[in-house]
Image: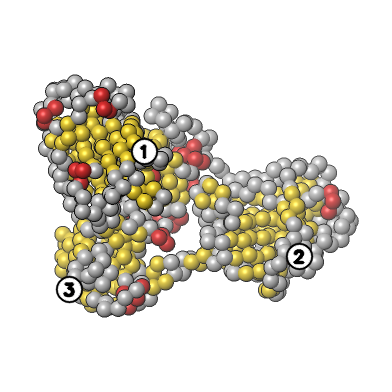
């Protein structure tokens, strides 16, 4: 804290009146007991909250009250054990502050505030306020309070406390019965607020409060020419299709950012993520960003487990800024530059004279040409939740006759002998119609790029394998030969969508590339899983969210970072295993579903977390394993003494509804020594 001087003028903090709550139930109180230190001259309140609320009183309107935890007064509607948020409203009210003989006074305390926003976006239902009044009624909900919160800093770890200082306004000086209060409220999402060392002291504070060290100034605009540095990317909190640069300083081990950040590379066995910072010497997790490394060449080139020499090097990444480990991170990385080495492909940039576009952050340099919209605003659009382009003519509850094209930028096949285009695509609602009647891949060598697609000659090319057309949104990697156009200096490709009132399918497309060489499609759920688990010794920990699957996706085969595979199958049941993002994400394993886990070495044990949204989804214990001993609890499914490279898990439930489902949130696989 800054030194305190009695005679220095107060600094101004903008405030506004908080009117009394109306029509709320009378709050209940938690008596405090007191271990407050003996007052000294010029000290009106000195409460640490180390072991109790002292002379402060908790008044809870609904939900979860203030509690003493970690030697602080803590407010949160979120319960970490059950992972459930309870709508809450609670006050922590001070004892009387007698300022009748005061000439000036101020309030100061230390705090940690986390999850107060939705990763940078304000959420008005999460309220954390500092209040003051000189007309306390004994009931905080019928008291008129002045909001003196000012600007609280949202933290990024549980160790860094920030300082709050407020010079009490003149209207309260000379009053005998002043109260202050901490107030929090939440609905479906809650902040966590920890407060300690609250003091009300005579005199004004000499300056604004100290704050902990902060990251370097944010720089950059997210372009390739001027990437965001880490400080700017953290401040941005959310963005798609941007460049971020930083120094590789470590990695995250396990599932917790707060507890798992590791600075260094010597003992790293994690291949799925990196930690980057603005400075190569950074050692505070609050100033870093985690980077998810997708399965493939980006992961192989950057991970510290296999590339310990990358530590301290500057890397430029192209991807999205979004929530990762519950903090701003970088995900969906398709391109990286490490020194002079380029890894992956830039969006809509020629690769060896050809073409590449992931559609992860938008349509890139592709253009949408609408021939007929039938009263709609669009057919093709970017589906940010699934990192793809999507075409649909289902509008206002019915099918619409429409035609719309997604056309590539011009590229060259000069000097290319065997060009192949490959892309991932998913189709739904085609029913009994032929796919080629509605969805076509076309090629032109005389299109002029003007948008007049009818003025050019287009050739339809067959792609395979074809996606299943009525089973949800399962992506298949398809490919088509462009050998007929080899040697052409100017080439365009297009995805043409056509619908009728009888049939308006949905077509989703992503990860397109044109290369010189043989193509080949993958079956649904093949190796499109950019997660893979975190390896530590003889254990791998897998969070199913790390695979980057879209919601409502049928799950087939997932490959882990160590080569172990998780092969899901429908079995004889009615429903396929599916991944849903609801309540934090899980794979739903229905009756008769089968999971085959295959490793290159003997498996000792497997633990599956089956708690979702605070509820147990363990198939009521109706599970069967091919080896080992099975133990099912409310929190997990445990399989021990396996001693085999392969384990088969079956859901044998004969009931229906939630009681029949195993929801797989995460999995820990331990291999035999």
Mark 3 to mark 2 CA distance (whole Å): 64 Å
Which dot, 1 or 2, sits closer to the camera? 1
* Residue identifier under label 1: 373
Which dot, 3 or 2, sits closer to the camera? 2
**What SS does tag 2 mark?**
helix
Mark 1 to mark 2 CA distance (whole Å): 56 Å
Give neighbour class at mark 1: few <14, some 14-19, many 20+ (Cα, 10 Å).
some
Which comes before the other along the chain, label 1 or label 3?
A: 1
Can you give x and y, in whole percent of width and height, for residue 194 in the image?
A: 60, 59
Labels 1 & 3 near each other (Cβ < 8 A): no
Q: Identify which residue, 129 or 571, lies in the foreground.
A: 571
Can you give x and y, in whole percent of width and height, for residue 667 in the image?
A: 30, 64
* Residue identifier under label 3: 626
Tell me what residue is drawn at x 60 percent, y 65 percent: 88
- Can you tell which quarter of the image residue 483 is in? top left
Which comes before the other along the chain, label 1 or label 2?
A: 2
* Residue identifier under label 2: 142
């Amino acid at each position: 804290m800054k030194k305190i001087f009695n005679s220095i003028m107060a600094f101004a903090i903008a405030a506004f009146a908080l009117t009394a709550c109306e029509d709320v139930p009378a709050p209940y109180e938690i008596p405090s007991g007191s271990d407050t230190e003996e007052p000294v001259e010029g000290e009106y309140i000195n409460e640490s909250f180390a072991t109790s609320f002292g002379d402060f009183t908790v008044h809870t309107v609904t939900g979860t009250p203030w509690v003493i935890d970690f030697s602080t007064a803590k407010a949160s509607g979120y319960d970490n054990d059950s992972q459930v948020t309870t709508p809450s409203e609670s006050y922590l009210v001070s004892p009387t502050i007698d300022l009748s003989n005061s000439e000036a006074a101020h309030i100061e305390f230390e705090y940690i505030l986390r999850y107060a926003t939705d990763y940078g976006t304000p959420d008005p239902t999460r309220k954390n306020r500092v209040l003051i009044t000189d007309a306390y009624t004994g009931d905080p909900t019928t008291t008129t309070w002045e909001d003196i919160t000012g600007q609280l800093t949202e933290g990024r770890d549980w160790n860094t406390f920030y300082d709050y200082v407020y010079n009490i306004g003149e209207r309260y000086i000379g009053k005998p019965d002043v109260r202050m209060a901490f107030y929090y409220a939440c609905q479906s999402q809650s902040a966590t607020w920890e407060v300690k060392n609250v003091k009300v002291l005579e005199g004004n504070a000499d300056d604004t409060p100290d704050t902990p060290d902060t990251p370097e100034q944010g720089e950059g605009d997210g372009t390739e020419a001027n990437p965001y540095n880490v400080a700017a990317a953290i401040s941005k909190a959310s963005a798609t299709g941007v460049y971020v640069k930083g120094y590789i300083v470590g990695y995250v081990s396990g599932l917790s950012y707060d507890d798992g950040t590791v600075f260094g590379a010597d003992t790293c066995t994690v291949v799925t993520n990196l930690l980057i910072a603005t400075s190569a010497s950074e050692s505070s997790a609050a100033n870093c960003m985690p980077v998810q490394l997708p399965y493939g060449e980006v992961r192989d080139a950057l991970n510290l487990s296999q590339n310990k020499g990358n530590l301290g090097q500057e890397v430029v990444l192209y991807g999205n800024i979004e929530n990762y480990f519950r903090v701003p991170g970088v995900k969906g990385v398709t391109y990286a530059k490490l020194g002079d080495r380029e890894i992956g492909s830039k969006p809509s940039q020629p690769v060896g004279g050809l073409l590449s576009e992931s559609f992860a952050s938008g349509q890139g340099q592709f253009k949408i040409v609408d021939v007929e919209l039938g009263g709609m605003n669009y057919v093709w659009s970017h589906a940010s939740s699934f990192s793809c382009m999507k075409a649909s003519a289902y509008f206002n509850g019915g099918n619409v006759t429409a035609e719309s094209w997604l056309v590539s930028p011009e590229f060259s096949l000069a000097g290319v002998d065997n060009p192949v285009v490959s892309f991932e695509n998913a189709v739904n609602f085609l029913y009994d119609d032929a796919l080629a009647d509605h969805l076509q891949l076309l090629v032109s060598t005389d299109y002029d790029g003007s948008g007049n697609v009818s003025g050019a000659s287009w050739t339809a090319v067959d792609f395979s394998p074809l996606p299943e057309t009525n089973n949800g949104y399962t992506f298949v990697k398809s490919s088509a030969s462009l050998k007929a156009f080899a040697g052409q200096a100017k080439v365009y490709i297009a995805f043409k969508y056509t619908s009728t009132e009888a049939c308006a399918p949905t077509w989703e497309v992503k990860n397109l590339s044109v290369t010189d060489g043989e193509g080949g499609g993958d079956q649904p759920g093949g190796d499109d899983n950019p997660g893979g688990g975190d390896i530590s010794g003889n254990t791998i920990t897998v969070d199913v969210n790390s695979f980057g699957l879209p919601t409502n996706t049928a799950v087939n085969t997932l490959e882990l970072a160590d080569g172990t595979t998780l092969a899901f199958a429908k079995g004889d049941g009615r429903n396929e295993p599916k991944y849903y993002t609801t309540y934090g994400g899980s794979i739903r394993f229905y009756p008769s579903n089968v999971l085959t886990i295959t490793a290159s070495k003997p498996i000792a044990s497997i633990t599956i977390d089956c708690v979702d949204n605070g509820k147990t989804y363990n198939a009521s214990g109706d599970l069967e394993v091919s080896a080992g001993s099975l133990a099912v609890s409310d929190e997990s499914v445990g399989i021990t003494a396996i001693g085999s490279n392969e384990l088969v898990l079956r859901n044998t439930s004969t009931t229906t509804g939630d009681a029949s489902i195993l929801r797989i949130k995460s999995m820990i696989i331990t291999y035999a020594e």
